[in-house]
Amino acid sequence: MYIAVGCSLALPQLLELLPEGATSGVLLYVGLRGFITGNEFFERCLLLFASPSEFPPERPYSAVPWRYLHLYTLIQLLCFGACYLVGVWGFGIGLGLAFPIVIVGFVPLRAVVLTKIFPAEHLELLDRRGR
């Protein structure tokens, strides 16, 4: 399936021959597959509703105290919400150009603000992305 999606980039005129429902279905499948399986952010969002004893021991973030883990996840959810609001609502009211500014604003958030809130060893474990 991934090869077929890649081939569509080389031959975009073939996409016109496919029904729109089939194309949307493939893209939905690929998006959900990448979102649900192996997405550490999604896993940590689910852990907001689980007890700390249910955290998967094989993940690097399991060594982080649950309060720091949940705070980091909530900050990421707020950043995601900011991207979503500027991306969806911004284009309707003319703020769509602010999207890059929001993304660039995450750099000092991570480099300055989060280093003051979280210990360095916890940030290192949270930034490992499942490795």
Image: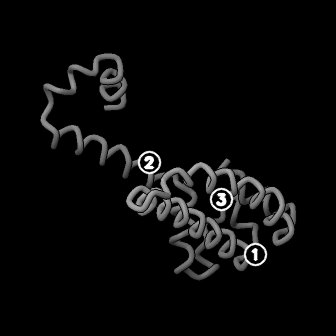
Q: Circle 1 is placed at which residue position? A: 65
For the residues bearing labels 2 and 1, Cβ distance under 8 angstroms:
no
Q: Circle 3 is placed at which residue position? A: 58
- Percent position of residue 70, x then y: 65, 75
The kind of residue on which mark 1 rests is: Pro
In the image: residue 94, left or right of residue 62: left
- Percent position of residue 120, x then y: 87, 61
Task: Give SS at disc 2.
Answer: helix
For the residues bearing labels 3 and 1, Cβ distance under 8 angstroms:
no
> Mark 3 or mark 1: which comes first in sequence?
3
The kind of residue on which mark 2 rests is: Gly
| Residue 34 tag number | 2
Label 3 environment density (alpha carbons within 10 Å; few <14, some 14–19, many ≥20): few
- Percent position of residue 75, x then y: 65, 70
Colour mapping: one colour
* Quadrant placement of the N terminus: top left
